[in-house]
Amino acid sequence: MSPFVSADRLALLVSLVPYLRQQEAAVPVETAANHFGVSPTQVRDAVRLIAVSGTPGDAGVYSHLDLFDINWDAFEAHDLIEVTHFVALEEAPRMSNREAAAVIAGLGFLRSLPRLVDESRIDDLLRKLGASSAAPHFAFGSTAEPPAARDAVSAAIATRRRLRFRYRREDGDESVRHVDPVTLETLGGDLFLRGWCLERDAERVFRLDRMREAVVTEVSAESHPAAERSRPIFTPSEDHVLVTIEAGAAVLPLLRDYLPSGQPTPTIDDRGRATVQVRIASMRHLARLIAGNAGEMRVLAPASARAAVADWAATALREHKKR
């Protein structure tokens, strides 16, 4: 068995207290050891350390009420753990409005992603934060429908099955693809499937909103060591248009995948903005990126890119007025 290093001991101590608090009866040492995957001796050592831990009172000294306490008779005679007094767990830490807003925004984003987590747990957390006096009251909701292929892609990844779907490229060309899924990723609010395309015999990235008739087949997905799981979704190419963008510091991370490899981090000026040059393959995607970050991003050059963003915004405005 590997040595019980300090990091392991700390992890056990941090986890053991809430675990014991959730139990309705005394817990056998062997049961706790199996739960955490450690030896019974390590659990006993942790319990003895917990029993002499606590928080000092207002005068900076410890009283019996400031320390954890256990049923020593049950522990020593029967190898049972029963904590009879808990400390420092009665009051939950309060969050500022800004902290609560950040947590709520993050949970909302996670809820919009593929169903790789239990969405009901996220909903429970959102309700608790909304009801907390420590948090501002937000009405959370999303009118955007997830891509139709989302559930099929999630299921294929979870079951390691091959996907079949029709895919429409940016130029409008459509074809049937068979793909062994690797990962599901997000960039700029869009969902992308990274996988091994059997038709191209190479790794490819597919936008879910361009996928149609996605079906999880009965064929098991094969392993493809050549798939570059760590590379960015978008790989800049000399064939792509070089676009100069002024961006605020808060949205610079959105442009990270468009920057050439090895390029230094853009310098932020005294206005909190930076000017960056990026390679863009799709003017439509550029327009959506800029419009989605209005006030934080603007295109400086070339003129064709500025025109594409203006046309996209004008079209969206006309469609809005028709409603």
Image (cartoon, rainbow, N blue to C red):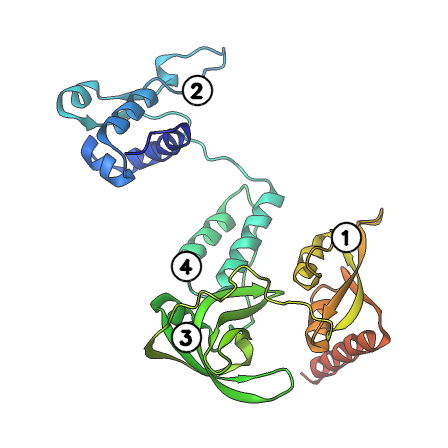
Label 4: few (<14), some or many (≥20) within 10 Å?
Answer: few
Q: Amino acid at mark 4?
A: Val
* Image quarter hosting the C terminus: bottom right
Q: Which residue is mark 1?
A: 266
Separation of marks 2 and 3 at Cα, in angstroms: 51 Å
Q: Amino acid at mark 2?
A: Thr
Q: Which residue is mark 3?
A: 152
- Nearest-to-viewer mark from 2 and 1: 1
Sequence-first disc among 4 and 2: 2
Quadrant of residue 156 within the rendered picture: bottom left
Label 2: few (<14), some or many (≥20) within 10 Å?
Answer: some
Q: Secondary structure at mark 3?
A: helix
State the residue at coordinates (49%, 14%): 58
Q: Which residue is mark 4?
A: 117
- Nearest-to-viewer mark from 1 and 4: 1
Separation of marks 3 and 4 at Cα, in angstroms: 15 Å
Sequence-first disc among 2 and 3: 2
- Nearest-to-viewer mark from 2 and 3: 3
State the residue at coordinates (68%, 74%): 285
Residue 289 horizontal side relative to residue 23, left or right: right
Q: Amino acid at mark 3?
A: Ala
Sequence-first disc among 2 and 1: 2
Label 1: few (<14), some or many (≥20) within 10 Å?
Answer: some
Q: Amino acid at mark 1?
A: Pro
Sequence-first disc among 1 and 4: 4
Where 319 falls versus 116 (above or below)?
A: below
Q: Can you give x and y, in whole percent of width and height, for residue 315 in the image? A: 74, 82
Separation of marks 1 and 4 at Cα, in angstroms: 35 Å
